[in-house]
Amino acid sequence: MSRTAIVTGAGTGIGAATARTLAASCTTVVLVGRRLEKLEQVAAEIAASHPEVTTYVKSVDLTEVTAVEAFAAWATTELPTIDVLVNNAGSTQPRFAGGLQDLSDVWESTIRGNLMSAVLMTEALLPRITSPGGRIVIVGSFAAQFGNGSIAYSAAKSALQTYVVSLTRTQGPRGITCNVVAPGFTGDTELVIGRIDEERHARLVSGIAAGRSASSQEIANVIDFLASPGASFVSGQTVTANGGVMFPG
């Protein structure tokens, strides 16, 4: 069966692992992100392991309406179907320097990078998503439940969960499932590597029952299930993959 998947933030980490994993069950995989060289590297990896799969690489700033509109127009013309949409792209919260204006700027930037990027892409592509049988998966964060040092980031990820519940009400009758995957501490992503010192790493791991951080591949496996035909009755959910967080680090 021919299936087409679009993965945003596909150049590194969870997005890259998801794109590589979906290539095993999809005939076409579209890799979307900002850094073309990273996307092309993942596309080359897919070509090496799944030469029968068609890949497209698209550099898109998902926070810009015109860029998302242009991508949606391209997808409408070039893709036969859109069966799976994985919204993984996100951003860290900028450093807060102080003052109300800076606070406003930090929140607006964080909300745009982590909430609106997913909303814009989803709404732009909704008319093209396969009905019935389409799958929408949005990557959130355990920070939505437990919070972290970045209040704006936690709020943005929490809003994604509410968005998906509302989206499910409108898309469920079309036979399209909509879910959030909320990863816990995932140690091999760019959000972690070079950003968290050993002390902080140990503190985060100490609150996880599994005694370690997740790998991007482990999160991709959860996304792969939600994107599969076997997940046809799972919708409107936040599926948490955090290794059993006993207390936030």
Image: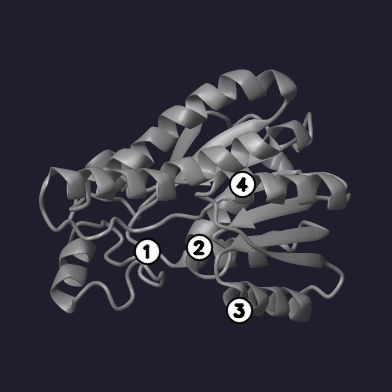
Q: Type of residue at label 3?
A: Glu
Number of residues whose C-alpha sits closer than 10 Å to that of mark 4, classed few (under 14), some (14–19) or many (20 or more): few
Q: Secondary structure at mark 2?
A: helix
Q: Are the residues at dot 3 and dot 2 in contact (C-beta closer than 8 Å)?
A: no
4 vs 2, front mark: 4
Number of residues whose C-alpha sits closer than 10 Å to that of mark 2, classed few (under 14), some (14–19) or many (20 or more): many
Mark carried by residue 186: 1
Q: Distance from label 3 to label 2 (Cα)? A: 17 Å
Q: Distance from label 3 to label 1 (Cα)? A: 23 Å
Q: Type of residue at label 1?
A: Thr
Q: Earlier in the sequence, mark 3 or mark 1?
A: 3
- Tell me if I can see residue 97 in this picture: yes
Mark carried by residue 37: 3
Q: Secondary structure at mark 1?
A: loop
Task: State left or right for residue 199 relative to residue 35.
Answer: left
Up the image or down, 179 lies above or below 224; here it is: above
- Tell me if I can see residue 147 in this picture: no
Q: Secondary structure at mark 3?
A: helix
Provide residue 155's location: percent of width, then percent of height.
Answer: 29, 39
Q: Earlier in the sequence, mark 1 or mark 2?
A: 2
Q: Secondary structure at mark 4?
A: helix
Residue visible at 50% across and 55% down?
89
The residue at which mark 4 appears reads as: 66
Residue visible at 28% across and 44% down?
107
Up the image or down, 50 lies above or below 5; here it is: below
Provide residue 208's location: percent of width, then percent of height.
Answer: 25, 57
Number of residues whose C-alpha sits closer than 10 Å to that of mark 1, classed few (under 14), some (14–19) or many (20 or more): many
Q: Type of residue at label 4?
A: Thr
4 vs 1, front mark: 4
The residue at which mark 2 appears reads as: 14
